[in-house]
Structure formats: C-alpha cells, structure tokens
Amino acid sequence: MLATLHADHAEDVPPGAPPPVTMLVVLQNELVRHGILSMLKSVPAVGSTWVYGAAAEACRLLAALRPDVVLCHGGDESTASLIEAARLHGARSLLLLQDLEVETLGQSLLASADGFLMQSEVTVSALRTAMERLSRGEMPLPADLARLLISRLRQAPAAPSARAVCLTPREQQVLSLVAQGLSNKQIARRLDLSEHGVKRHVTNLLAKLNCPNRTHAVALALREGLILPDERARPAYS
C-alpha cells in the first residue's frame, strides 16, 4: 500500500446525512494518483481512503478493507478483474478514463462499471458530484462519453429478446433520459416530477430489465429497441 488517508470530515457533514464513504484508489501513474488523493481530501463525502499502485495487491485486500467505492483506471489490463472483485465485495466501481477512445475498452468492462470520469476533467467539484451520484444509486457519466457509448451500443447487433418487457410511457421517458446521462434531479426537472418519483421509476426499470445498474439497463434497452439513441422525452402520463 502506498498511502492511507483518514479524512475527518465529521464537521463538514450535515446532520442526518449519510456517513462519509470509504474509497480504494488503484492507479499506476504516480502523478495522477497523488493528484486524485489530494483532491479527495477536499471532498466531504469521502472518509478513509486506501491507495495502491497495483491492482493485484488491491484485489487481495478487498475483503479486509471493504471499501464503498473503488476508483481505478479504465485502460489497465487488470481493470476487469478488479471491478469484478469489487462487485463481489459490495463495492461500486468508478473508472477514470484518459480519453474518449472507448473502442479500446471491452463491452463487458463498460457495462460493469458504476460510473466514469474523464481524467482531463477531474476536479474537486467533479469528484464531489460523482460521489453524490453514486450514493444516490446514479451513474456518473460525462456527456461526451454518454454520446459515444450510445453510438457504440447502437451499432451493436441486436440480440433476440429473452422475455417481453412492458414499460409504461413514463418509464420509457425516464429510460430515454437515463440513456442521455441525466441525473435523477435533472430528470425530475425535465419531466416535472419529484426526485423520489424518478427514483421509483428507475428502480422499477432496473427490476423489469433485470439489470444491476443504469449502464446495463441502457445497454439492454438500446439493443432490444426499447429506446432510440436520439430519442427525447415526450409528454406522457404517469
């Protein structure tokens, strides 16, 4: 282990707010690693953080550390095994991408991550927003990356549907906006709903599509023609 950060943000956390999350940062590049760690110190939602340079060592200690979130680089060869190990130990994964060349990333890797950050766009504010979205069960996803992912999924051959999926007009609207990378708050504002109502729709969508997260749901919906990549929400009844 290269470093351990025990951040005490107790005074910064509002009363009634959830406790700070624990993080496991796994990045080979020393400069990037130190930069991320320095910024995390200013994110109130983040508590104890363990830092490693090698994924293999981090994987071995996941069971003992039990972090809430694993942040790692998307282009490393060992990323897939690290994300899978994180999932098995109940941790969410946040991928740090160097560029928008998602063609170099495997489909299963893209579908298994819980969120994405572009390395060139990482700031304290971006990390804070990503942690807030993860805590709400949402998927941090830069707009440019969302468009590229949707374009890539659109070109994928359609797979035969294993079962009929019946979505309400409102669920189809919400799913379309989720595919555009909007947060629950943004969807609520767009559709004139409460955030609680949007969260309920998203939960129903994940259950109907039998998907563990929003990324899987969007991928499945695009492949099975439940939404179109350029579709926009239209007026509908709840």
Image: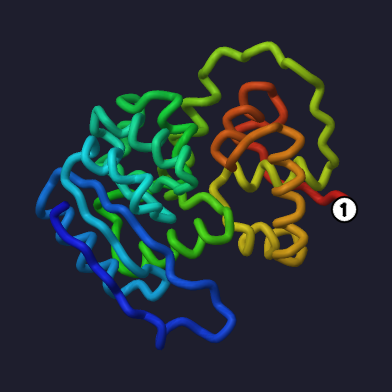
Residue 162 in the figure: left or right of residue 142: right
Residue 137 falls in which quadrant of the image?
Answer: bottom right
Residue at (46% x, 82% y) in the render? 13
Work out whether 24 lies above or below 131.
Answer: above
- Total numbered badges shown on the rendered structure: 1
List the residue tagged with mark 1: 238
Residue at the far right: name it: 237
Residue at (33% x, 50% y) in the render? 71
* Helix, strand or loop status at disc 1: loop
Q: Nearer the viewer, residue 9 or 150?
A: 9
Work out whether 195 lies above or below 163.
Answer: below
Q: Position of residue 166 (x, y in %)?
A: 84, 31
Residue at (40% x, 52% y) in the render? 66
Q: Amino acid at mark 1?
A: Ser
Residue 146 in the figure: left or right of residue 127: right
Q: Position of residue 140 (x, y in %)?
A: 47, 52
- Disc 1 crowd rating (10 Å Cα; few below 14, some 14-19, many 20+) is few
Residue at the far left: name it: 30
Residue 180 in the figure: left or right of residue 58: right
Residue 203 in the figure: left or right of residue 144: right
Residue at (29% x, 62% y) in the render? 49
Q: Position of residue 99 (x, y in %)?
A: 27, 40
Q: Nearer the viewer, residue 88 or 113?
A: 88
